Every structure is written in C-alpha cells, then in structure tokens.
Amino acid sequence: MNERAAAFDGDGYRKQTVTVNGRIDSARGAGVFLAGGGKVFIGPSGRIDADSGVAILATGDSPGDSPEGPAVRPKLLVGMQLDGRRVATVLGKGWIINDGGETAILVNDVKLHDGTTGVVPGAVAANGAWDVTIREAGIRVTNRTDADPANWTVSEPATGVVAGRDFSADDFIETAGACPSGYVGTPPDGRMPPPPQPLCPPGQASAPPDCTTPPPQTCPAGQVGTPPLCETPMPEPQPEQELWSGPSTGPRPASGCRRGAFLRGPADASQPCARRKLAPRRARSRHGRFRTGTRIGRQPAVRPRPEAAFLTPRIVPGTHPSPAFPTA
C-alpha cells in the first residue's frame, strides 16, 4: 500500500501524468509505470516498445480517506493521438494493464471506454483512413509471471468485464472509414485532390503556358473528311439511260424512252426523249471495198402515185355486184 503518493484530482486520478512524444524502448519492465494510477498521453510522434510485453502498467492500492476505510484501486486514463497510425504501431506488442482498477481509453480525443461503465455505445474515433472502436468483450491477464508474454494466462473474452480489464492491440477494431474532409479516394488510399488547373483563353487549347490555337475542324469547300485528312470526293456515276415504248417527244415515264429514242438529260420524267441517230451501215461493193450508205445494191425507183389512187378503190366493170356496175 502506497503511504506516500500523489494526491487525487477532481476526477479521482492521481496527480501524475506521463506524456510520450517520442519513442520508448524498454528491454525490461513496463514502458510506463504509474504507482496508484494516473494519466498517460501518447502524442502523434509517440510510441512504446516494451520487450516485457507491458506498455503501460498501473498498480498498487492507495489508502482511502481514513485509515479504517477501504483501499482505493488504481484509476488509469490513457489517451492516444494516432495521427493515422495503427494502434499496433503505437503500442507495439505491449499491453495496457491496470491491476484491478478502472481504465479509461481515449483515441484522438474520443472516449471509447469508460472506467466505470465499459465500452461507450456508438463511440467511433476517426483516424485518417480508419475508424477505431473497442470490442465489447473484455479480458484480464491473470498470470504474467513468465518472461514471455506468449505464456501468460489470459481469461476468455466476456461481456461485462469493466473493472480490471486489460487491453492489447487486439481489443481495438480498425475498419476502413470515410476519407477526411478535403481528401478524395477510398480509404486507406485517401489522398489530397489535385489543385485546379488554369484554363486557356477562349479559342485556344491545351493548358497554360502551352496554349495553342486549335486547327480548323472542317475541311475546305469541295472536300470531305476531317482535318487534316481532307480529300476531294470522287464524282458520282451518272445513271444509265433508260428506254421506254412511248412517244419520242414530250414527257416520259421514269422507265425510259421507247426503242429508237434516247434521253436528253438525267433520268427525269420531265425531260423529253429524242429520236436516236443511227450510224450508217457500211456495205461492201462489188470491187471488195466498203462504201458508206444506208442502201445495199440497186433498188428500183418508186413512182409517185396520185393521191386519188390511195382514196378511190379501183373497180373493173362486171366484177362488182353493185347495181351501178352491171356485170354483163
């Protein structure tokens, strides 16, 4: 029992505080020892490595208000500023042990465990890419006489363990959370967003200071394609001339002109047809040479007949049964 110990503050903690802003390497014994309890604060650059397996130890009962009263169990408060680090990095393989007393745990100024009531319901400590909580079931180290922490006697995890609960890195649950304000990405790969890029003046491309005037987006008149691959289009083939059996002049249907006539223009029903001019045939003369002309050989001349010959029938008397022409 500590007869000479620091006084208590208003919250019941011993007025002894240890602040860790660097690295503590302990080959033997606890990294931080507090007789009768107190407070330990680990800063953003602090960490504790203890080969003994005990990072922080609070032990030793204190006398009460009167000699006849019950002894006061050690009361311990541990606050850690992780600054994005994992709990295992800060505590190493060490334990936070309070021999039978109350222990309060704060992570990044968020109380996750109360020394009187246990785990704070819904308490989550944001830690960069991670959200830190404490598991509900607690354990106690009941025998640590062996120098190797792997051979210590540890109770089974159970709910309702508050007084005398001991903590290791396994008691802290770290899950991927939302990136902090001003960061983008998905934890744990959150990163600061890139700064906004300056813009070029209107009508120019690229990014400053390499602003340039973009090339034209259309080809010159009479060409097709996309710059710089502009080319002159091939002329469209003219439609073939069509023939039809209608009159050679006047409007024609879309099917074409009659035989012996040809189209004057494109295949349009509004264009008239014209008679096709046939090339003269070439005939062979009796001397073996070809001569031009449309007639071959000598043809008899045709005498012109009077027009009445085509209109008045020729009747021989005596051959027609009409009364005007007697037969005998």
Image: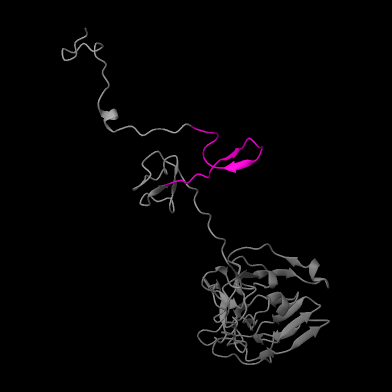
Could one spot residue 113 in this view of the protein? no
Quarter of the image for residue 16 reads bottom right
Q: Position of residue 119 (x, y in %)?
A: 56, 71
> Residue lying farthest front?
328
Viewport quadrant of the C terminus: top left
Q: Nearer the viewer, residue 134 or 44?
A: 44
Could one spot residue 83 in this view of the protein? yes
Viewport quadrant of the N terminus: bottom right
Q: Position of residue 235 (x, y in %)?
A: 54, 60
* Residue appearing at x 43%, y 52% in the figure: 264
Q: Position of residue 167 (x, y in %)?
A: 67, 73
Q: Which colour assignment does the render follow?
A: one colour
* Residue appearing at x 53%, y 33% in the figure: 298
Q: Is residue 309 found left or right of 28 in the rendered image?
A: left
Quarter of the image for residue 247 reads top left
> Residue lying farthest top?
328
Task: Report if residue 287 lies within the magenta region.
Answer: yes
Q: Position of residue 106 (x, y in %)?
A: 60, 80
Task: Report if residue 18 lies within the magenta region.
Answer: no
Specify the principal SS of the magenta part.
Answer: loop
Q: Nearer the viewer, residue 163 or 198?
A: 198
Q: Is residue 217 found left or right of 14 in the rendered image?
A: left
* Residue appearing at x 69%, y 69% in the figure: 170
Q: Nearer the viewer, residue 156 or 68?
A: 156
Looking at the rendered structure, the number of numbered marks drawn on it comes to: 0
> Residue lying farthest left?
323
The magenta segment is: 275-299
